[in-house]
Image (tube, rainbow, N blue to C red):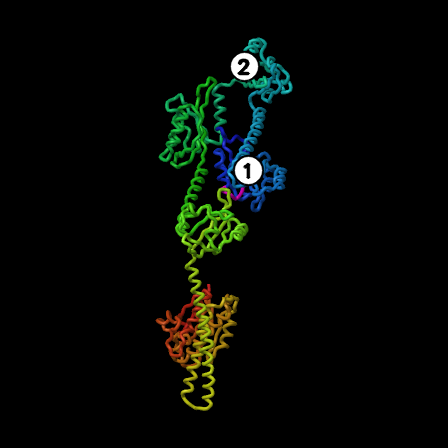
Amino acid sequence: MDTSRDAPRSLSKPASIAVLYVGGGCDFAARLERERERFTVHTESDPRAALDRIRGGDAAFDCVVCDYDLPALGGLDVLDRVRAEFPELPFILVTEQSNDEVANEAISAGATDHFRKRDDAARHQLLAARIENAAERARTSRALEWGLTAVETARDAVCVLDEDGTVEYANAASATLLGSDREGLVGRRWGSFVPDDELQPTRDAILSEAREGRWSGRSSLVRGDGDRIEVEHTLTSTSDGSLVWTASRSDTLEERLSRRERAMDEAPIGIVLTDPSQTDNPIVYVNDEFTALTGYSRDEVLGRNCRFLQGEATDEDAVAELRAAVDEREAVTTELLNYRKDGTEFWNRVRIAPLFDDDGVIDFFVGFQDDITPRKTYEELLRSNTARLEALFEHSPDLVVVHTDDGSIRDVNQRMCEELGYSEAELVGKTVWELDPTSDPERSRSFWAGLPPNEPTRFEGALERRDGTTFPTEVHLIELNVDGEDLFVAMIRDISEQKQREAELVEQNERLDRFASVVSHDLRNPLQVAMGRLELLADDCDSDHIDDISRALDRMDDLISDLLVLAHDGNDAMDIQSVALSDLARTCWQNVMTGDATLTVETELVLDANPEQLQQLLENLFRNAVEHGSTGNQTASGDAVEHGSGDGGVAVTVGETDRGFYVEDDGVGIDPEDRDTVFEAGYTTSAQGTGFGLNIVSQIAAAHDWEVRVTEGTEGGARFEFRVE
């Protein structure tokens, strides 16, 4: 257990109060800190980490303020664990809503107080007052315990005498000093410890002066074993007429100073004593913590004025405040940027106070030095972040609006004013539905109430300018706690161009649908009639022209099929499935007029693809290879330029690469200068080509986010490689 929590936190008045806030509201903590200058509020959102900080002793907290609703560990669970280890540490449980059951449970579990959090200045002041009172009560209680402990463990004798000088209380040191047990001291008259030859004058001089207020001096006392001892002792009267008697053996001044120095050397803060009676108020003592803080040894410090710690960036106003306090013989606390021996900067909270002797003359100035660099660094970071957020708010290219849960606008950025044609003063105070013609008050309030805090939500709306024109918007809305108040921050973007593009795409798709209808019905139906009539004509007439007409009609049918694929593939939704490439390749091979061509499948690859579109891709590539790979013609079904071997069917191979698959044949291949253009729609080098076959292949690959490239095959033919990762 951290014993530093049971020690006094400060020698200045009023003492600072360290508060640990366990919860998610940094703004709530910052606002609470602003309520009292003496507050230092530490924030921890993770309750388990907060318990570790309390146990770890990295800060001695005077009060814990804890939210009821916490992640992983509730506020009451935190209370139970704190009470198990620190039963006297003030603990205030904070809830969002008033709940008598929770309040009773909290008090029963040992909470110091229960408080309902609300965004109200008066409530923040009330909470600050409760924290202050709880911390002071705890300190007072500890002070009483410390006092009693200090008296019981003091090396000096301490006794309490009644009005007649009879001992009513004696500590353990009294029994040691006076050579008697404590029970034997209680009930004895104070005068019984004074030697007989000094009794009357001592009683008359000392007791009468003590009853007037205070007596201090040196005299002889008689121990229980009869020995006489010289003691320094003090008698002080109290408000009820009692006397407090303290006594100790007379030691030399050097011994007393040595003990005090040892005590100061153990202090956890830097301590300096300066002598104002000497020129330039030099340092006459520093403790170990001061040397550790500054990097200077005692010999390097003694005899110098404290200003040697100052440097270029030290605030002159703070230095002047210290000098004025020394000149006026007054206490003061200030914060300085000081420099260590190695030149590094550190923030130093300096508290100085004069020390007076019994005659009211200043003996020394004592200075206490605290390294507050971490706190200053955090404050500077907070200021920097705040400045950046404000700059982002004001100069964001998006329109930014801050509003409450009733739709009232609290703040807007400059971009919002410029876009709508209003001033900031005109917009603040309006409601959201006054600017958004698509917004309904009741529906909006219900929507906002259901939003999870700190999670952005996207939706579309509209805004109306001063001149009455409107434009569509995309809104990213998030609920945040700002200075203890739940507010909604909307980041709005004009999507007029996006909506226009969407309308153009709809119109384009409608044109494609109309085109597909024309191709499917108005062209294919007469084509089928022509094919039927040609068959009848072939039965009645033997002519060389009939074969030419048949090939032309077949080519027209292929062209119509390719056009329909292009028209419909852009509209079909992609149904992605796991497809075994080897099985699909063999199926596609059966759908193509292969003749003497052969297929070899050298892969067990399973692809995530649309089966119908992948089938179209493979069939187009197979048809391209089979029909033109071995004819010797400079043609391709899809217009890649291939040359057949001339001595048999083409060999087609489907294989696997390290990032995808390939389809290749053993023809002559595609000329390098044509490889960049073979996928273009309409490209062909043959009167029989449609110009769409390989364009369809490239579109199917693009729809799957695949990359396709044409290269030379293993046997010199064409190779189409698909990268699917």
The amino acid pointed to by label 2 is Glu
The amino acid pointed to by label 1 is Val
Within-10-Å neighbours for mark 1: few <14, some 14–19, many 20+: many
* Numbered tag placed on residue 491 in the rendering: none
* Disc 1 from disc 2: Cα separation: 45 Å
The vertical placement of 373 against 520, above or below, is: above
The vertical placement of 450 against 511, above or below, is: above
Q: Position of residue 701 (x, y in %)?
A: 45, 67
Q: Position of residue 172 (x, y in %)?
A: 60, 22
Residue matched to label 1: 64
Is residue 527 shown left or right of residue 92?
A: left
Whether the magenta-drawn stretch holds residue 33 is answered as no
Which quadrant of the rendered structure holds the N terminus? top right
Q: Which residue of the protein is positioned furthest toward the front in this rendering?
A: 468
Q: Which residues are magenta?
A: 22-27
Whether the magenta-drawn stretch holds residue 23 is answered as yes
Is residue 545 shown left or right of residue 195?
A: left
Is residue 658 among what the camera can see?
Answer: no
Residue matched to label 2: 212
> In the structure shown, which secondary structural element does the residue marked by tag 2 occupy?
loop
- Quick one: label 1 or label 2, which is nearer the N terminus? 1
Tally the numbered discs.
2
Front residue (pair 553, 99): 99
Q: Position of residue 9 (x, y in %)?
A: 51, 31
Q: Position of residue 413 (x, y in %)?
A: 42, 48
Within-10-Å neighbours for mark 2: few <14, some 14–19, many 20+: few
